[in-house]
Image (cartoon, rainbow, N blue to C red):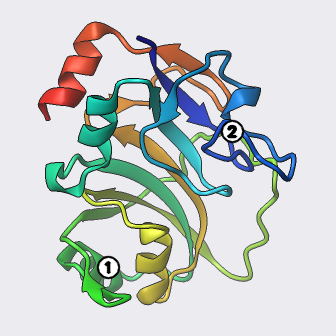
């Protein structure tokens, strides 16, 4: 059973088909019968686990397991530690309160250029966020709620698995030991 780690570029759907002709996982991954364990929105980039292993998909996507996912976010605005602390403590968002998370400002990371250019309207900074839940567009909504529009979002780790040597559009098979790590978390 194939289980792969894929670095999704921006402007790619996390499905294998699209009626509108947009790029999908099929444009990068040459296997059938496998599915994305979780999603990244069309504009977001980064790690996806793609597999036919239903128990692994459940483990990675069921919020009860609280598997940490780590992101780098380019945020628009002037850095303010107080606002990042609000995110760390959890915030009210669309009728629920987010779980506490880890947030810190980081230096500009070395990332491939986006295919869709960014046009900031003011100062920007990078933050590293680690969350253990994954509601739709959660990080974008969280940062916007404290006054920081998210201009670029890159998932850099799922549990203990990181990007490693992968570049945008590349994939590799997970080792049996890596799959065990994901299932044991």
Label drawn at residue 112: 2
Query: Farthest residue toward the right?
Result: 21
Q: What element carries label 1?
A: helix
Residue sitting at x 52%, y 20%: 165
Closer to the camera in the image, 133 or 72: 133
Closer to the camera in the image, 108 or 103: 103
Q: Is residue 39 rendered to the left or right of residue 177?
A: right
Query: Farthest residue toward the left?
Result: 184
According to the picture, the residue beneath numbered tag 1 turns out to be: 81
Identify whether 45 is placed above or below 80: above
The percent position of residue 65, horizontal first and vertical second, equals 16, 48
Identify whether 46 is placed above or below 100: above
Q: Earlier in the sequence, mark 1 or mark 2?
A: 1
Q: Is residue 62 rendered to the left or right of residue 109?
A: left
Q: Is residue 180 rendered to the left or right of residue 28?
A: left
Q: Is mark 2 on a helix, strand or loop?
A: loop
The percent position of residue 133, horizontal first and vertical second, equals 28, 60
Rounded to the nearest angstrom, the CA distance separating label 1 from label 2 is 27 Å
- The C terminus, quarter of image: top left
Residue sitting at x 82%, y 47%: 22
Inspect this view and state whether residue 35 appears. yes
Quarter of the image where one finds residue 174: top left
Q: Is residue 160 rendered to the left or right of residue 143?
A: left
Residue sitting at x 42%, y 39%: 37
Residue sitting at x 82%, y 58%: 117
- The N terminus, quarter of image: top left
The percent position of residue 153, horizontal first and vertical second, equals 55, 57
Callout in the foreground (1, 2): 2
The percent position of residue 34, horizontal first and vertical second, equals 52, 25
């Amino acid at each position: 059973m194939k289980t792969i780690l894929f670095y999704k570029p921006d402007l790619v759907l996390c499905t294998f088909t699209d009626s509108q002709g947009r790029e999908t996982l099929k444009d990068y991954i040459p296997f059938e019968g496998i599915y994305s364990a979780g999603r990244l929105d069309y504009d977001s980039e980064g790690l996806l686990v793609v597999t036919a292993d239903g128990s692994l998909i459940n483990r990675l996507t069921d919020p009860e397991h609280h598997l940490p996912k780590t992101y780098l976010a380019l945020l628009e605005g002037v850095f303010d530690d107080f606002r990042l602390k609000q995110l760390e403590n959890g915030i009210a968002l669309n009728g629920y309160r987010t779980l506490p998370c880890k947030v810190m400002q980081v230096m500009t990371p070395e990332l491939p250029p986006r295919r869709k250019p960014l046009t900031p309207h003011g100062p920007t900074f990078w933050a590293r966020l680690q969350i253990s839940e994954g509601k739709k567009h959660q990080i974008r909504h969280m940062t916007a709620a404290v006054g920081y529009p998210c201009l670029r979002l890159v998932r850099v780790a799922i549990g203990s698995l990181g990007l490693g040597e992968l570049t945008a559009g590349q994939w590799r098979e997970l080792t049996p030991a890596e799959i065990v790590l994901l299932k044991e978390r």
